Image (cartoon, rainbow, N blue to C red):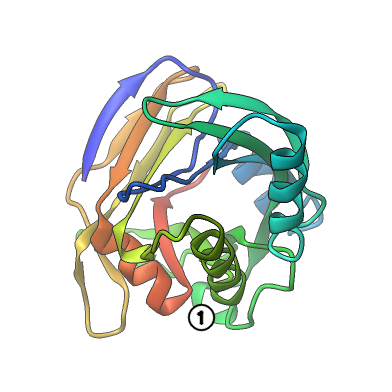
Amino acid sequence: MKLKNITATVLILYFSFLTACDLSFQSSIYTRDLSDIIESDGKNVTEIPTQILIPALDKKKKTQTKILKMMKGVVNDPVFKGWKEGDFEDFAIIETKCKINLVENYEDEKGKLPLGELLSFYVTKSKEFADKKGNKLHSLFLKLNQDSFTNLQEKIENEYLQEIDFSDVSISFEVVNDLRKDFSFILPNDCLVDSKGYLSVTEDVIRAEPRNNFTVEMTNVFSSYLKQNGKCRILLFDGL
């Protein structure tokens, strides 16, 4: 796992398929959202805009229509937002929304995501996970709708005759502190999974000062775990 400080003001969840057919997801979130959902006891459910970049053979209207049709049933209310040029191909930008929900603890969230929700974030109300020093922490975890991803995978493979394997997905996201105080967090170590199926955690506590951002890059070991289990912790944090 790599970490670097940057100056942007969003949390970006980025998926990049390491094949000739690239696909990416970009979402935005703020630390204040984590605070609000805990303080409101889950009443303030946040929906965050998420952009999905779909490879396009050309920038024609019929391609736009075809890609929007491809996304129906995979995400809710897909909206075409324009085109983005890549190094070797162009991409259609499709926008949808992901939710950030509150659950009592990590084990409580066992159900499948509903149709149309490809990804969703969850925050644990309880401090149910201990770091290596015994400090109890909240969890922020990500859920994947495995059925929806399989649906998207099949549609893209049929359209482009290009296989996509989720184990080749690289995931990165930005932690953005828009609070007026430091935000301390710990990252999972995506190379190790303990006997309970939890990702082990790193030793270091990272402190983001107000208006400070950090980009975290996960390896494909993490992606494989997420695809297999349907959910995985991506951040551990104390009080806000």
202 left or right of 168 in image: left
Q: Where 60 falls versus 72 (above or below)? A: above
Q: Secondary structure at mark 1?
A: helix
Return the x and y of residue 212 as percentages of the image width and height: 43, 20
Q: Residue at x 20, y 43 (%)?
A: 204
Please say whether residue 36 is visible from this viewpoint.
Answer: yes
Please say whether residue 131 is visible from this viewpoint.
Answer: no
User: 100 or 53, which lies in front?
Assistant: 53
Q: Amino acid at mark 1?
A: Glu
87 left or right of 101 in image: left
Instruction: Write down the quadrant of residue 34 in the picture.
Output: top right
Q: Residue at x 38, y 29 (%)?
A: 88
User: 134 or 5, which lies in front?
Assistant: 5
Q: Residue at x 48, y 18 (%)?
A: 8
Judging by the rendered image, the residue that carries numbered circle 1 is: 107
Q: Where 142 falls versus 150 (above or below)? A: above
Return the x and y of residue 175 as percentages of the image width and height: 45, 34
User: 20 or 71, which lies in front?
Assistant: 20
Image quadrant in which the C terminus is located = top right
Instruction: Write down the quadrant of residue 7 in the picture.
Output: top left
